[in-house]
Image: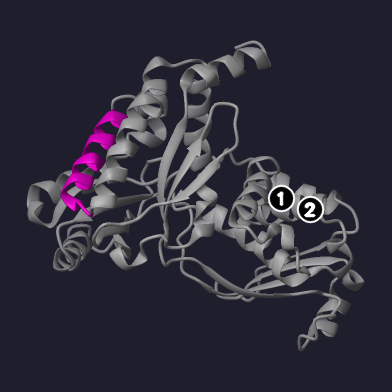
Amino acid sequence: MNSDDDRSEAVEAFGEGVCVVVGTSEGLDAVAWRLDGMDGVDGASEITTEASSGRGFRFVATSVSSTEKLDCDVSNNDALECVAAEGGFWSYVAGTALEVFREHPECRAGGLHIDIHSCCLPTKKGLSSSAAVCVLIVRAFAEVYGLKDLARTEREMELAYRGEALRTPSKCGAMDQACAYGERVVLLRFPPNGRMTVEEVAVGADIHILVADLGASKNTVRILDDLQRAFRSSHVGLREVLGKRNRDHVEAALNAIKLGDAAELGRIYDSAQAVFDAVGPELCPTELVAPALHDALTSVKRDIPHTIHGGKGVGSQGDGAVQFVCTSEFAVHELRQYLNRQSAGRIHSFVVVRLAKNLVAA
């Protein structure tokens, strides 16, 4: 494509993008306060002295390492822009802070300290860990400074997305920031040349989903870069998979979730995985051949098929994580034991997602 008009026409022809996002109980917990000490938090004055006389931005991940921190003088953008451009964990923090300052420059004066005291979300597994950090930064600024325009979850998502996608080397999509909705099930729609909408989804009955860390590695940036390049080049197979076939799968999955039909949802998982596998590996062979993912999917279906209705990769696929729709709560425990034993402890089943009827949206 040679012009913005060409890209616009291609998006229009592609049609609406849709996805279903289910949050987990895994995530980040933190406390935050202004560095100028105006909120009366114990120790704020001492921190202010250490952080450029109140113009600093500090992020401390105490649950990971007491020495991991980011200190920047934010009286101008230079320091944060340098950090954001480097990529990696701190780039998401810096990039999102820049987006907050763009809309609320008054936040520079008081600074911000964020102290993570709990972090149970695995990184580099396709589970929106970077998006969770970005949402955390937006939410912290909003809470500490009373930014009422950021009180809506959609606005949190918007700034978090811009902080990652526009300010860092990441090629993330806007769906990742749906982690801001927590454990709720939401439907995201991306109209051609329009504004994303979010709709909560009612759950008809309990559905048990096991998510497991494959104990391997994935390069999400590489995956998204290769797929976006193919999409922009009008790769017919990829556009079909991400377009009409995806819309069909999402519609069927929505119906299954609303009915509480775990068996049907599992069949949709299998179908979606097969459709993606028909094009993904050829477009990004270094990541999407995904031997660990496919070995897990194959071995479970071969050895303990009674425990699952179906399975697929997570997020942008690759060897980050796998998810299975289980036949029962008991089957979840049997599957966890099998995965751990079969992989000699390499695969760690870290979360069970329970789409629960008592979480039906109002």
Q: Position of residue 92 (x, y in %)?
A: 65, 53
Three-letter code for the amino acid on which mark 2 is drawn: Leu
- Looking at marks 2 and 1 on the same chain, the residue that comes earlier in the sequence is marked by 2
Q: Name the secondary structure under disc 1.
A: helix
Assess disc 2: are there few (<14), some (14-19) or many (≥20) residues with their C-alpha within 10 Å of its C-alpha. Answer: many
Residue 101 falls within the magenta-colored stretch: no
The answer to whether residue 287 is above or below residue 228 is below
Q: Which residue is mark 2?
A: 80
| Mark in the foreground, 2 or 1 | 1
Where does residue 283 sit, x and y in percent of width and height? 41, 24
State the SS at label 2.
Answer: helix
Examine the structure image and report whether residue 270 is included in the region drawn in magenta: yes
**Residue sitting nearer the eye, 311 or 327:** 327
Tag 2–tag 1 contact (CB < 8 Å):
yes
Identify which residue, 39 or 68, lies in the foreground. 39
Relative to 98, is 62 on the left or the right? left
The residues tagged by marks 2 and 1 sit, at their Cα atoms, a distance apart of 7 Å
Does the magenta stretch mainly form a helix, a strand or a loop? helix
Q: Residues within 10 Å of mark 1 (few under 14, many from 20)?
A: many
The answer to whether one can see residue 36 in this image is yes
Give the magenta-colored segment's residue range: 260-277
Q: Residue at x 73, y 63 (%)?
A: 148
**Residue appearing at x 48%, y 38% in the figure:** 189
Which residue is disc 1 drawn over? Answer: 95
Q: x, y (%) of residue 255?
A: 27, 44
